[in-house]
Amino acid sequence: MSDFYTQAQRDLQDEFESRALADRLSTAIVTSALADEQIRFIESRNMFFLSTIDDTGFPSTSYKGGARGFVRVPTPGSIVFPAYDGNGMFVSLGNIEDQGKVGILFIDFETPQRLRVRGDARLVRDGAMFESYPGALLVVEITIDSIWQNCPRYVHKMAPVDESPYVPDESGHARIALWKRIDAMQDVLSPADRQAAETAGLISMDEYGARLAAGDA
């Protein structure tokens, strides 16, 4: 994959005398299609980190979580995942709509392992794939450009405790976010969210901050 590296990356490889190593690695581990074991790894994950870029060149990185299997691999050259209700800023999804370039980092903190994916993404608003994700606002479909597995030596080994109770269930129903229950936020929420917040019980900004600090999000 002679075009895998940029000129700036090549310059640093030359500065630190690692060009031969970089060429060996890109030949040995970088591919454009997922192997069977990589597909199984991705589909077993319940979270990943997503990077996007806006039209000014600034990157954004976000955490995406769901039930195990929420990231799917329709073909060895593509992956899809749902975009659930967020904070209404649409930073990552707006960047995808505008620029289309994404990077994804999958990590297994128990084993540990990590896999990096980059490709071209688009937003899916209807159709069978969209309908197969109850509770999703949109579905993101990525055509893979490059995949490579990194050495996990700096990945801290950790054990999971609980999955988030806010992940939509099989019918698409999800618990309302704690921040949407803040009294000062009610005037900017949708009618449906306001009703759900009132049903769950409104809280003050101070109470939200205290619960957030205690890990009760």
Image (spheres, rainbow, N blue to C red):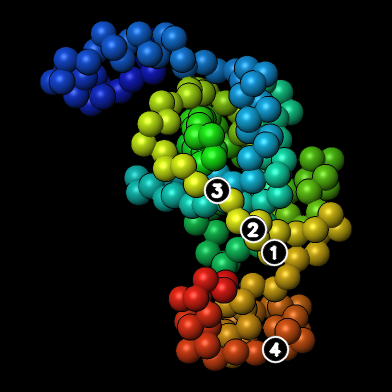
Disc nearest the viewer among 3 and 1: 3
Disc nearest the viewer among 3 and 2: 3
Q: Are marks 3 and 1 in contact (CB under 8 Å)?
A: no
Q: How far apart are marks 4 and 1 (CA)?
A: 17 Å
Dot 1 falls on a residue whose secondary structure is loop
Q: Distance between the residues labelled 1 and 2?
A: 8 Å
Dot 2 falls on a residue whose secondary structure is loop
Q: Quadrant of the N terminus?
A: top left
Residue beneath the point at 50% across and 56% down: 91
Residue where numbered disc 2 is placed: 162
Residue where numbered disc 3 is placed: 159
Estimate how packed mark 4 is, as few (under 14), some (14 to 19) or many (20 or more) residues with alpha carbons within 10 Å: few
Estimate how packed mark 2 is, as few (under 14), some (14 to 19) or many (20 or more) residues with alpha carbons within 10 Å: few
Residue where numbered disc 1 is placed: 165
Residue where numbered disc 4 is placed: 201
Q: Are marks 3 and 2 in contact (CB under 8 Å)?
A: no
In the rendered structure, which amino acid carries the disc numbered 1?
Pro
Instruction: Determine the image quadrant of residue 150.
Output: top left
